[in-house]
Amino acid sequence: MEGALAGAGLGKGVSDLFDIVKDVTRNSLMFEDVLEHLKYTLARLKPVVEEIEASNRELGRPEETKALIEKMKKGEDCVRKYSEPGWWKFHMRSRYASELCKLEETLIRFFQLDVQAWNLRNGLETLKGVNDIRARMNGVGSCAVPEAPDFTVGLDGPLRGLKMELLKKEVSILVLTAPGGCGKTTLVKMLCRDEEITGKYEGNIFFIPVSKSPNLKVIVQKLFHHKNKQVPHEFPSDEDAINQLKQLLNGMKQKPILLILDDVWSGSESLLEKFAFDMPNYKILATSRTEFRRFPTYKLKLLKGEAAMKLFRHSAILNDGSSYIPSEDIVKEIVKGCGGFPLALKVIGTSLCGQHEAVWRSRVMKWPNGHPFFATSSDLLDCLQRSLDFKDNEIIKKCFLDLGSFPEDQRIPVAALVDMWSELYELDEDGILAVANLCEITNRNLASLLVTMKDASEVGIYCSEDFVLQHDLLRELAIHQSSQEPIEQRKRLIVDISENKLPKWWKEPRKQPISAQLLSISTDDKFSSSWGNIQGSEVEVLVLNFQTKNYALPKFVEKMDELKVLIVTNYGFFHAELGNFQLLESLSCLKKIRLEKVSIPSLFKSPVQLRSLEKISLFMCNISQAFRNCTIQVSDAFPNLKEINIDYCNDLTELPVGLCDIICLKKLSITNCLKLSALPEEIEKLVNLEVLKLRSTSLEQLPESITSLSKLSILDISDCPEINKLPIDIGNLCNLEKLNMKGCLRLHKQLPPSTSNLEKLKLVICDKERAKLWEPIKEFCTSLKIKLAEKDINLHWLPNRS
């Protein structure tokens, strides 16, 4: 036993000490009472220690038990000495007994005090981490500076010049200006990673995307949230919001502060003045396509010569460097035609990647004579328009144009696009073709597809948290391309309403209704729901984006007889009340509803029956009241519902039992709902359920009745740290193929014997500790693959504008 505890963990320490005490007790009559008591204590502590050991390994905190391990090593030596023969130990009996009692007291005190403190700390850290994630998905906590692109060129000189101007003592506001697509935001991201800047403004650099219709109150609320301060629920006025922000900044102990306002549009220079506080060590850096003459300006020049060539070549070459690039003269002609705009160089370079020389030459032939110097966004749009040649796949081009349906500088959920495209273009419901189209769009640098969880693809094609980001200039390109026909003939109608100013065509009497299949309407925080009327009987997809506190569905929705998909998104800071839900009852074709950041009143105060509804997705919604006080059965309201997605709904404490009556349900996904701690036993009624996702919840166990779901093929319980065992009869899930149990830290006991009956199980995703439990099962499940989950740390939830 010499050195038994050397380098060992806490779990091994308890086990070794327990074995020695047990052996000494069995072979010695001396000290029997003391040793029996210590043995009993160690036996009680062993399973708890195993849990602590597993958690500490997951969290990377092995040092926290080092002191206790040392004491147990001394205890091991002491007990071993007691077992040695010798006349002297009779005289030392009371001393040894006292030391054994002290060892036992040390163990008990450790578990009564230290472990409780650890649990409290870990709980607080978990809560903070969850709140951070929720804030990221909410879009309200994103005042951190996004990561700069991996590859940049021609910005080292501008970086030095911009930093020099910003650090001048007399400069309190600096505007970085250049036409769209020149890399202003990229340069700012690089500046904020500069050691001199991060050293000066440590922890106090705030990055705010402003865009075309800035909401000052929301900007201030974001800053409060970023500093972990209580966010004022409502500001009486913009002036009050500014006053409270000034108090917040004044309370930062005079530390230097840098506020970055990205993408300030023409006409919004007053916004800079409102944020211009007379405070020491406080500066504002703004980016804009417009030069505001009343403020100091740093102009970012377009790329020239070798820098432009280098960026273009980088975009036109495949990752393996195998792409064909024609003669230098042709490359120079194309680079010249891009006018030095980095965005044009990237997009057009990517569109030519891997193309035949004839395609390259034809592109040169299409340039206007003289290759004019691009100085306006419209010129750049014309330039980028040439990159929209998708050959024979016109669907991909349509998918790109559809991205303009969502507001600028906002993430676009992949799940929403899948809903849209599965109906508009008859793509598959699982999203395989939709994601493939997004990858093609991303490959052309026309958008960025950001995957937030790498292992999600193993248990489904896409994750509810995956999303797309698009440069605002490319959004303009999409809208421009969708607006070439007269209003009545457009298949995609995108409307941005500022305050209550409806477009002229909307207010004019029309001889014929619009023929759009996709209608997108975005309103700001000043809109008062004065909709007027619009005839859209052919609309199949309706996208409503808003920022107001209360929002009622437009009255004209009930006349949209062909409507199949409804997407309603609140981009305000707080949840908004959603009204007029009953209008949907008249829509016999409505198949899919996606609601984001809305509070849903009881759906059944005035019974709403949506007989054609097949899928409902609730993201960051308040839904605790939605299924209460029902006057009709949920199954009667949604008789054909096949899929329910509930994500980041933090008021969900229990799954409404009524949902278990929807026997045609095939997919149930409840993710990131931290207050959900149990599922009803009635879940066994969902006999047709094929996919069950319960990721990132507070579930303590799965109900035994879940084993009745014989059609279940995918089960995801990843990041459910409270689950400590699988159902005893889990082997009854005879069609289970994929199981994700990453992050189930308390699940480390032997798996139920019935697990060996999962003959169709093909994939288990877990960590090393859980993988050991599955090794014996592979003998019975011959096709089983165990995949170790990767630690996936990324910043994809941040804005990624270039």
Image: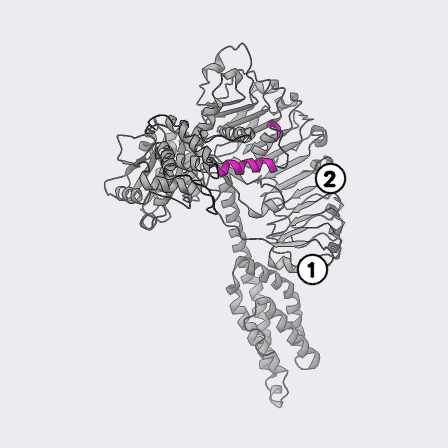
For residue 244: magenta?
no
Quote the CA–CA distance across marks 1 and 2. 28 Å
> From what the image shows, is residue 174 above or below residue 632?
below
Give the image location of residue 563, x and y in percent.
Answer: 61, 23
Disc 1 on helix, strand or loop?
loop
What residue is drawn where x is 71% and y is 44%?
Answer: 712
Front position in the image: 379 or 365: 365
What residue is drawn where x is 66% and y is 65%?
Answer: 44
The residue at which mark 2 appears reads as: 686
Residue 218 falls left or right of residue 644:
left
Front position in the image: 367 or 756: 367
Give the amino acid at mark 1.
Answer: Gln
Give the image location of residue 209, x and y in percent.
Answer: 41, 36
Give the image location of residue 389, x and y in percent.
Answer: 49, 30
Tag 1–tag 2 contact (CB < 8 Å): no
Numbered range of the magenta stretch:
422-445
Main secondary-structure element of the magenta-colored stretch: helix
Quadrant position of the N terminus in the picture: bottom right
Quadrant position of the C terminus in the picture: top left
The residue at which mark 1 appears reads as: 750
Residue 158 falls left or right of residue 361:
left
